[in-house]
Structure formats: structure tokens, C-alpha cells
Amino acid sequence: MSAFTPASEVLLRHSDDFEQSRILFAGDLQDDLPARLDTAASRAHTQQFHHWQVLSRQMGDNARFSLVATADDVADCDTLIYYWPKNKPEAQFQLMNLLSLLPVGTDIFVVGENRSGVRSAEQMLADYAPLNKVDSARRCGLYFGRLEKQPVFDANKFWGEYSVDGLTVKTLPGVFSRDGLDVGSQLLLSTLTPHTKGKVLDVGCGAGVLSVAFARHSPKIRLTLCDVSAPAVEASRATLATNGVEGEVFASNVFSEVKGRFDMIISNRRSTMGCKPAWMRRKR
């Protein structure tokens, strides 16, 4: 990556303030500012595999990819720079996780586009790190506060589920179609032929609903599922286990980590245009 996002451009207006800070970057890390900003030390944690691919090339082991951050991921950091995502429940999951690990007194910066709902950060963190808006530019807001109280974080409380034709779909914040089956998946499911055999690859698997629905009427298929999102990978594993379906699930930037040959590829990958998924902009 070379060009910076508007959110990163706002942060660069304050670059002098970060030179002596030991920073943890997290959230929606869409560029490589975490690797390029002049700091005393920098770490990054992301739930997006493609973001980790970019950052790990420059930051090595200081860039981490996982669903849940650990104490090792935030070790020695005295500042959090959090890029607000487009999904509020996703932000809550990530921030509660990170703030439960960082020591009281940590400087907290939250930056994001106004249209993404970054203003919600003030209310979300009011009990833990009261925020004040310190800059506004490029249609973004930058908020600052100091951690006064660590929240109690329990990842299990963020799990959800819904039913589709007798199947149980497990979900987490940030997973595509978290609250129900989308129109595109419904259409794709209607076209799958029963009693199919062979190796099937589900690209951009989300919560795993396509795979478990396919396996129900084609039990002899061998499933492989992949997604760039750590929440999606974990949700798909849970969906398969809950419905008694076997399959391999792993993180991959489309085909980057996929090995071998397949008889069929299925996908309803989410594509985004701004803050709304592309499928929401199309006419049904």
C-alpha cells in the first residue's frame, strides 16, 4: 500500500505527538501507516487476514492476526490508535477486548469517517475512557481519551445464532449476514444441485451457511471454507460443528492460502462500496 486513507491522513496531522509513544494500532487498518509512522515502538492487531499480510511484511511478528487479542499482542504499549470500522458491534467487540488488556492510563485515540458512525465511540467508551474530539478533517473525526477503567471482556457473550430451514447458523460481530440469510445467499442456495459429490471450496464463507446447507442435501461433498475475516473463520467452524458437518476452515485472502484442486467453487463474497455492501446498492 502507498496511499493513505482519510483517517490516516488525519492522524498524520498529529504525527509529532506520537514520536515517543509505544503504539498499538487496531481496528480497520486499511493502509500501512502502522508500519510507517515514526514512533518509539509499534504493534498492530487485526482481524482481517489481508491487512495482516500487508503489515506483517514490514512489521514482522509485531503485526498479529487473530479473533481475540492477547496480553502478548499489547505488551509494553502505552497508546492505542483504533480505526473505527463500519460495523458498530464489531467495534464494541474489538475495543472491549483491547481495553481489557491495556493498563489504566493508556492514551486512547479513535479515528474514523463520520459516515461510519465514529461518533458512537464517545458513548461506547464513556465508562472506560471518556473521549473528546480533538480534530476534524477529511470527513473524519479524531477522538482522544485516557483509559480510566478496564472493561470485563467475555468473547462468548458476543456469539449469536439464527435458523435457516432447520440449520443453526452461528455468528459473531463483523460476519457477513450476521443477522440473517441475505438475498444473494438465498439465490445461490436455490441453484445448488442435490446429491453433488467431490471437493467443494467455499470462498468468503462468512458464517458457513452455504456450506452446511449444501452438505445437508449432498452429504458426500468434501468441504473447504476460507475467508479473510477471523470472526468469519471462527463462526464457520462453529456452524459446521453445531450442524455435525465436517470441513476444513482457514483464513485466506481469496485463494492465497488455498492448496489443491476442487470440483466446485461456491462464493457469495461480500464486496463493499463505501459504507454499504455492494449488494445493498443493487436492485433486487
Image (cartoon, rainbow, N blue to C red):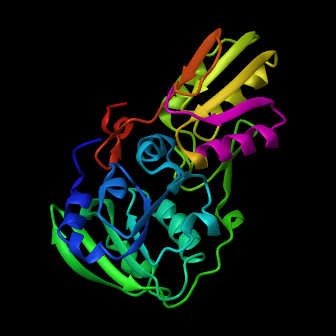
Q: Farthest right residue?
A: 244
Q: Percent position (x, y) of residue 274? A: 28, 46
What is the span of residues highlighted in magenta in the rendered image? 232-254
**Vertical position of residue 135 compared to residue 8: above or below:** below
Q: Please say if 169 is above or below 282.
A: below
Q: Which of 214 and 149 is in front in this view?
A: 149
Q: Which residue is drawn at 44% across and 51% down?
A: 59
Q: Residue at x 50, y 48 (%)?
A: 60
Q: Is residue 191 visible?
A: no
- Outermost residue, bottom side: 148
Q: Where is residue 79 in the image (x, y as percent from the top left)?
A: 42, 76
Check the image and report above or below for 77 versus 128. Answer: above
* Residue 217 image point, x, y percent: 76, 20
Q: Is residue 66 left or right of residue 239?
A: left
Horizontal relation, residue 171 to residue 103: left or right: right
Q: Nearer the viewer, residue 81 or 85?
A: 81
Which corner quadrant holds the C terminus?
Answer: top left
Q: Which residue is drawn at 34% across and 68% down?
A: 39
Residue 216 location (% of width, % of height): 77, 25
Place residue 154 in its image quadrant: bottom right
| The N terminus, quarter of image | top left
**Image point (15%, 61%), residue name:** 138
Q: Is residue 70 above or below residue 221?
A: below
| Relative side of 31 to 58, left or right | left
Question: In this orientation, does residue 93 appear?
Answer: yes
Count the marks.
Answer: 0
220 magenta-colored: no
